[in-house]
Image: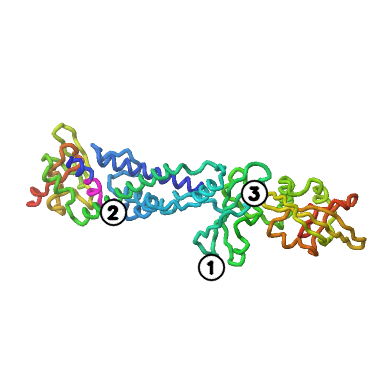
Amino acid sequence: MVRNLLRLVWLLLSAWLIVWVLEGLFGVDQRHSVLPFQGDGSSRPALFIGVAWGILPMLGIFSPAGPGRRRPRHDDRIAVAKVIAVDATGTTINDVPQYDIFVRVTPDSGEDFIGQLRMLITPDEQSSLVIGAPLPVRFSSVKPDAVALADPLDPAVRQALLDWRIAKGLIDPRQVRARTSGITSPADILSVRPTGKRLEGQSELALTVLISPEGQTPWEAETTLFAYPQAIGRLQVGSPVWAMYRREDPKTVAITIEKETVA
Amino acid sequence: MLDTIFWLLNFPASNGYAMVFIAAFGSTGLAMLAFGGTRGGRSRLQALREQEGLATPTASAGPAVLARARQIVFRIVFAVVLGSGALGLLALIGVPVTNAYIHANGIETTGTMDSGDWVTFTTEDGTEYTLANDFFTPSVYPDAHASVGWGDAPVTVRYLPGHPQAFVIDSTPASGG
């Protein structure tokens, strides 16, 4: 907005200078100029206007705006994105380097797109930013170039991510009711077997879990789960997980690694 | 041909004061526009989109040809501004960059001056020209510091036949008085 205004001012100043040069080269009666501010015919207005014209491009009004920082907005959509490139911008703030993270966003509906995310990353956070790492992002469908990190602890984001998983088929349709409105109980993994199915970079595992709600007899259930490669280490035999099920159908279970509350 | 060149060169030389400032302040910004790298965030985004085989969701800033053309235009403007600044500087320190040529090749006529800022003379074809004579870079030759045309005294003006905007005031007759 301000950038466009300054560009317009620059163009007006350019036009003024061009007319000034043309009048100087072709003018027959140079005492009467068509230009504003050119009253007494001295070169002082041209000097000031020329200096202003010269300084404006130094403010970077012609450099591409870049994605900038996104402020969260109400109509933002949430999706999971995969890191495809990480570039250092060369800027550091308080010794923390700034990076441009390019992500491939897979929205719940519509085509994939590439978005950009500029942020500061401390060296210890940097190890988690490998190519292919999943990130929850918020984006606007109007201006998808710049995306922002979505806070995974925000309930609205959790709900959106859950909707995204359901839309992408990462949660078995039979488990959806248990996952969205079930009871959460601690469970332990009894057996793990990959099924060989892959979706959105996640692998499906067939699990047998022992569900042991407090004060009840434990029972076993069979289920499947899509997990990112990074999470598979937490889904080994004996790993404690959380199971979600509905009271009337305790054999249909959805597994989560972190405790999820029903949104 | 030479007349045309000197007519063009005469403009920055006769507006030396303004030109030096414009070149001094403008060249940095223009150089950024003319030689600034294309390492913008958008172009990287563009490259990755092509690599991933995805169509651009928004119209990009313009095809590369346009950016290249803009760069070339700004290079020309940069060269012109820098050259004008150099000419203006020479004129300011008293080098008769164009005045000598105009004095040697100009057509002589008589004109009047108004408070030293304006020179009025009539050319061979009968057109009356009123042209600016800058205080800092006066178009006076051979003695640029000669005081000419004070009062209503007529001055001798030499102008290039094709382009009367390129003129000098001959200081020789006035230097005696």
Alpha carbons under labels 2 and 1: distance apart: 41 Å
- Mark 2, residue position: B20
| Depicted B20 relative to depicted B152: above or below | below
* Residue A125 on image: x %, y %: 62, 64
- Residue type, label 2: Val
- Residue type, label 1: Asp
Numbered badge on residue A95 = 1
- Mark 3, residue position: A73
Identify the subunit bearing mark 3. Answer: A
What is the magenta range? Answer: B9-20
* Residue A237 on image: x %, y %: 79, 63
Identify the subunit bearing mark 1. Answer: A
* Residue A96 on image: x %, y %: 55, 66
**Residue B154 makes an appearance in the image:** no
Secondary structure category for the residue under label 2: helix
Viewer-side residue, B151 vs A52: A52
User: Which secondary structure type mostly characterizes the magenta part of the structure?
Assistant: helix
Identify the subunit bearing mark 2. Answer: B
